[in-house]
Amino acid sequence: MAIKRLKQLPKASILQDSAFLQFTQDAESYILLCPKCILHTDFGLINVFEYLKIASVFPSEKRRFLETAGIKYSTTGPAIGYNYTYSGRHWAGLRFSVFSMYTPGFKLRYLEESYKSKGFMAHFLEFGYNFGFQNKNQQFLISLLHTQEPVFVKLFQLGLEKGKSENSAWFYRPELGIGLKGFYFSGGYQFIFNKKHRDLVDKWFLSIGGCVVLGKSKYPD
């Protein structure tokens, strides 16, 4: 309850609040009582500082200790990606996300202590393009929001497939799969809106791909 209350305060007020001061003092006292518990204690502390959006004032010696132990920070920014899709036909594609966030998975180690954290990746407003090798068709895709790692969930995706003829087919394209270290494997189904065009677009598909977030990993502000 105290942490939730602190989150509502300005940064300067948090640092002077008695509950926050007591919390940090208790953490230091715990480390004195259990020196081998420093890894879990300092990792818990940095998570609280990040939650309160005051990570920039996290003690530098503790930050260096966690970096030596193996902590990795999030990277945010636009992202570019690629994919290969099989739907009975072969497709190659490119992706561009306006904003993405990636926190690599890592394992902290210190003496006999260890802590493992799973990676996480998400994309906001992604534009995609697929090219069909056999029929030379093109697909244009847009996705509002989706996660890529550890679970690939893309539920808000629309697409348009254009062929050599004047026919164009709009479709809804949800995908589910798994992701690891920027790569993913997914599958899905394409729901074609116009009944007249349902024979023009493949239904089931499998896709494999990856992406890179175009940002610099840094200690959170």
Image (cartoon, rainbow, N blue to C red):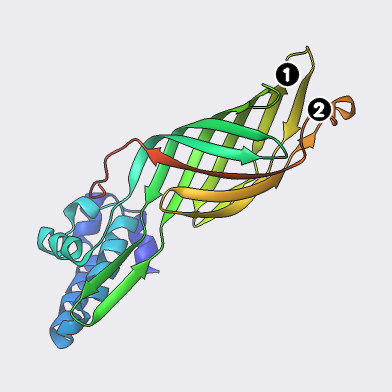
In the image, residue 126 sits, relative to residue 18, either above or below, namely: above
- Tell me the number on the disc at residue 200: 2
Q: Residues within 10 Å of mark 1 (few under 14, many from 20)?
A: some
Residue 141 appears at what percent x and percent y? Answer: 62, 29
Quadrant in the picture for residue 128 = top right
As rendered, which of 78 and 169 lies closer to the eye? 169
Q: Is residue 6 above or below residue 99?
A: below
User: Is 99 on the left or on the right of 29, as rendered?
Assistant: right
Q: Amino acid at mark 2?
A: Leu
Between 169 and 7, the residue placed more toward the observer is 169
User: Is residue 5 placed above or below 169 in the rendered structure?
Assistant: below
Residue 11 drawn at (x, y percent)? 25, 50
**Residue that badge 1 annotates:** 163
Label of residue 202 in the image = none
Q: Residue furthest front?
A: 134
**59 vs 154: above or below:** below
Q: Are marks 2 and 1 in contact (CB under 8 Å)?
A: yes
The extreme top residue here reads 166
Q: Is residue 19 visible?
A: no
**Which amino acid does the dot numbered 1 rest on?**
Gly
In the rendered image, is residue 155 in sight?
yes
Residue farthest toward the bottom in the current orientation of the protein: 33
Circle 2 Cα neighbour tier, 10 Å, few/some/many (<14 / 14–19 / ≥20): some
Q: Position of residue 133 (x, y in %)?
A: 63, 27
Q: Identify the residue shown where x is 89% and y is 25%.
A: 196
Label 1 residue SS? loop
